[in-house]
Image: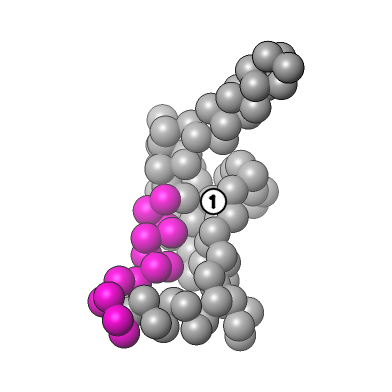
Amino acid sequence: MTTIPFTHLNQSYEIRCVFDGHTYHVRAFKDGKPANGFTYTVSFDVAFAMKTAQDQNIVDIFVEDAKRDITEDRWAKLLLAIKESESEK
């Protein structure tokens, strides 16, 4: 497991990257618990193909996305959009 610490609004977070032998998993944590409901996953085969064909490291891209989930408060925005959509029905 790789852990990438970062701070946002004086709060400490970490991005955890785990490879289980088949799949990479990337998720943001705060105080040892998931910071939101987002988890990024990609199979080894797809990650390898992206690196080989397009010279892109998808795990690094997922790490940046997980950080932006925190800094842009994306989870709260998603929940609000769902709530608003349900109230329109």
Residue at (65% x, 21% y) in the render: 85
**On screen, 74 above or below 26?**
above
Q: Position of residue 61 (x, y in %)?
A: 37, 60
Image quadrant in which you'd find residue 57? bottom left
Residue 2 makes an appearance in the image: yes
**On screen, 54 above or below 75?**
below
> Magenta segment: does it hold 57?
yes
Query: Which residue is nearer to you in this view: 12 or 29?
Result: 29
Question: Left or right of 16: which side holds 34?
Answer: right
Query: Which residue is nearer to you in this view: 35 or 22?
Result: 22
Q: Main secondary structure of the magenta part?
A: helix
Residue at (43% x, 59% y) in the render: 62
Q: What residue is shown with label 1?
A: 28
Question: Left or right of 71: which side holds 79?
Answer: right
**Where does the magenta region start and end?**
52-65
> Magenta segment: does it hold 79?
no
Query: Which residue is nearer to you in this view: 39 or 14?
Result: 39
Looking at the rendered structure, the secondary structure element under dot 1 is strand
